[in-house]
Image (cartoon, rainbow, N blue to C red):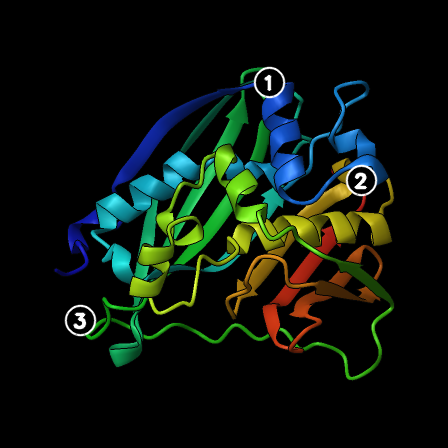
């Protein structure tokens, strides 16, 4: 089994997805929203979390995996970059198209599969651009180019904001109903086959918790002001383990962030960048 080199540059899509307020609310509940941030969990005056964009493109991610011929026994979400062009309406039809842009070879450590896509709403507005990195642990050693360094330096000082939260022990079972049905997050036998004690949190579920924390700390009640979110997923997290999102303000409309397990101190999401303010 090897990566499909002919997949680079091949168009994926357009892929369509209809959604309504129930989909947006289910996603919000899947990333820990509740009565404390009811604007995401109740249809009255509903606001959509920016990271709902990931639930909107699971079909694209699936097509990237199929088209690239990744060995699914070794695939993990590596990095994520989201650029927001317009706030996400609470209902409508989304159209996504993109392609696999490149592969990077990490030798016996695996490979990186990079894919990019744009998503439009049925009202004609361009909503967001996604740049996705899948870490293919079993697909390295094909003689490809190495990845350029991704340098994000967290300040050597206490964070400006800290938000603690505790995902439910059943959190992945809720989150997966938004479309990410990969068995690693629900099937104990599959999780053990991949080297884990039990099913783990979706990295993108923890990503959603972090998004809520960033909005709470930087633009309270105004998710439409999130302009960009980037990060690297660095370590597995088990459901029910408390987490801490630490945020450093680094300039006007800019912040860096990390998510760590408060149980072990391990950083589970690193190199986070958040840009915020009015979307021009």
- Residue at 78% across, 65% down: 247
Residue 251 percent across, percent down from the top left: 83, 64
Q: Image quarter for residue 196?
A: bottom left
Q: Secondary structure at mark 3?
A: loop
| Residue 62 versus residue 110 in the image, above or below | above
Q: Is 90 placed left or right of 147 in the picture?
A: right
Per the model, the C-alpha gap separating discs 1 and 2 is 25 Å
- Report whether residue 9 is seen: no
| Residue 91 location (% of width, % of height) | 62, 18
**CA gap, disc 3 to disc 2?**
44 Å
> Farthest residue in the left direction?
1
- Is residue 135 toward the left or the right of residue 48 in the image? left
**Among the two numbered marks 3 and 1 on one chain, the one whose residue lies closer to the N terminus:** 1
Relative to the observer, which residue lies in front, 99 or 258?
Answer: 258
The residue depicted at 29 percent of the width and 48 percent of the height is 65
- Give the label, 1 or 2, closer to the camera: 1
Picture disc at residue 278: 2
Residue 144 pos. (x, y %): 23, 71
* Numbered circle sitting on residue 237: none
Q: State the residue at coordinates (74%, 30%).
A: 41
Q: Which residue is mark 3?
A: 142
Calculate the distance from the C-alpha at mark 3 to the C-alpha at mark 1.
Answer: 43 Å
Q: Quadrant of the C terminus?
A: top right
Crowd rating for badge 2 (residues with CA inside 10 Å; few <14, some 14–19, many 20+)? few
Using residue 35 as the reference point, say whether residue 274 is left or right of it. Answer: left
Circle 2: element type? loop
């Amino acid at each position: 089994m090897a990566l499909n080199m002919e997949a680079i540059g091949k168009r994926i899509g357009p892929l369509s997805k209809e959604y309504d307020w129930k989909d947006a609310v289910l996603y919000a509940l899947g990333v820990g929203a509740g009565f404390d941030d009811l604007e995401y969990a109740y249809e009255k005056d509903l606001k959509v979390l920016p990271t709902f964009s990931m639930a909107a493109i699971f079909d694209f991610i699936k097509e990237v995996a199929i088209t690239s011929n990744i060995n699914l026994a070794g695939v993990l979400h590596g990095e994520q970059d989201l650029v927001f062009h317009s706030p996400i309406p609470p209902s409508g039809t989304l159209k996504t198209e993109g392609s696999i842009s490149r592969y990077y070879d990490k030798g016996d450590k695996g490979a990186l599969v990079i894919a990019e896509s744009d998503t439009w709403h049925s009202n004609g507005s361009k909503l967001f651009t996604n740049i996705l990195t899948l870490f293919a642990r079993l697909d390295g050693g094909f003689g490809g180019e190495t990845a350029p360094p991704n340098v994000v330096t967290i300040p050597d000082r206490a964070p400006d904001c800290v938000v603690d939260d505790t995902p439910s022990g059943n959190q992945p079972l809720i989150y997966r109903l938004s479309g990410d049905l990969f068995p690693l997050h629900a099937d104990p036998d599959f999780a053990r086959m991949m080297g884990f004690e039990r099913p783990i949190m979706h990295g993108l579920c923890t990503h959603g918790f972090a998004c809520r924390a960033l909005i709470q700390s930087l633009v309270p009640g105004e998710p439409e002001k999130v302009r960009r979110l980037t990060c690297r997923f660095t370590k597995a997290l088990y459901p029910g383990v408390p987490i801490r999102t630490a945020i450093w303000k680094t300039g006007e409309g800019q912040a860096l962030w990390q998510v760590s397990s408060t149980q072990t101190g391990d950083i589970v999401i690193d190199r986070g960048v958040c840009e915020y303010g009015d979307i021009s």
